[in-house]
C-alpha cells in the first residue's frame, strides 16, 4: 500500500509540474494572439470576428493560466484536499465555447483572398494564417496529450497488475 501512495505522490507532483510548465510555455503564444488580433483588427472583412476571436481567446487563456499558476503556487505546501476554483471552471467552459466559435469563423472562410484589400473575401494573410495554425495546433496538442494519457494509463494498469 505504501508503494501505491508513493506512486500517487510522484504522479501528482509530476502532473502539477507539467501544468505549471505548460502554463508558462503558453504565455508567449497568448500574448501573440492578443497582439496580432489587435494589430490586424480591421483587416479581415471576410470575417470580422477572427481578430476578436484571437484577442478574447488570448486574454481569457492568459487569465486562466495566471489563475492556475497562482492557485498551484498557493497550494504547493498544502497537504489538504485540493478544491477546484469555480471561476476556473467558468473560464474553461467559456474558452471551450469560444474555441468552437473560432473554429466556425476560421474554417468556414478557408482560404480567403490575401491580395485584394478591397475584396469582401479579403483577410490579412498574417492574421488569418496565425489564427488558422493556432487553432490547428490546439488539435495537434490535444491529440498528443490524449495519446500520452492513454499510454500512461496503459503503463499504470500494467504496473498495478504486477504488484
Image: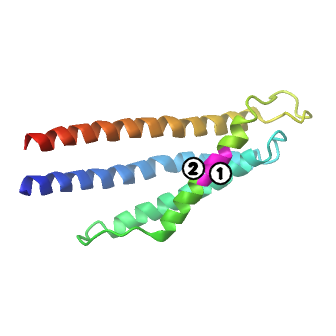
Residue nearer the viewer, 5 or 56: 5
- Measure the alpha-carbon separation of dots 1 and 2: 6 Å
Please identify the dominant SS of the magenta region: helix
Q: Position of residue 77 (x, y in %)?
A: 25, 69
* Residue that appears at 47% across and 64% down: 67
Q: Position of residue 11 (x, y in %)?
A: 23, 51
User: In the figure, is residue 24 to the left or right of 111?
Assistant: left
Residue at the extreme front: 161
User: In the figure, is residue 144 to the left or right of 3?
Assistant: right
Label at residue 15: none
User: In the figure, is residue 41 to the left or right of 80?
Assistant: right
* Residue that appears at 79% across and 36% down: 123
Residue contact between numbered discs 1 and 2, judged by CB atoms under 8 Å = yes
The quadrant in which the N terminus is found is bottom left
Q: Which residues are drawn in magenta? A: 97-102
Residue nearer the viewer, 31 or 148: 148
Label at residue 30: 2
Residue at mark 1: 34
Q: Position of residue 107 (x, y in %)?
A: 69, 35
Amino acid at each position: 500500500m505504501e508503494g501505491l501512495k508513493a506512486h500517487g505522490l510522484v504522479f501528482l507532483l509530476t502532473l502539477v509540474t507539467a501544468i505549471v510548465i505548460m502554463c508558462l510555455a503558453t504565455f508567449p503564444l497568448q500574448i501573440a494572439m492578443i497582439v496580432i488580433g489587435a494589430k490586424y483588427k480591421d483587416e479581415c472583412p471576410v470575417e470580422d470576428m477572427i481578430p476578436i476571436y484571437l484577442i478574447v481567446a488570448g486574454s481569457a487563456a492568459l487569465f486562466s493560466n495566471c489563475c492556475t499558476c497562482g492557485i498551484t503556487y498557493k497550494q504547493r505546501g498544502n497537504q489538504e484536499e485540493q478544491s477546484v476554483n469555480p471561476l476556473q471552471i467558468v473560464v474553461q467552459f467559456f474558452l471551450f465555447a469560444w474555441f468552437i466559435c473560432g473554429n466556425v469563423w476560421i474554417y468556414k472562410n478557408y482560404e480567403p483572398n490575401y491580395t485584394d484589400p478591397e475584396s469582401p473575401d479579403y483577410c490579412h494573410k498574417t492574421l488569418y494564417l496565425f489564427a488558422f495554425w493556432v487553432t490547428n495546433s490546439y488539435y495537434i496538442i490535444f491529440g498528443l496529450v490524449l495519446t500520452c494519457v492513454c499510454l500512461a494509463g496503459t503503463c499504470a494498469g500494467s504496473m498495478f497488475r504486477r504488484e
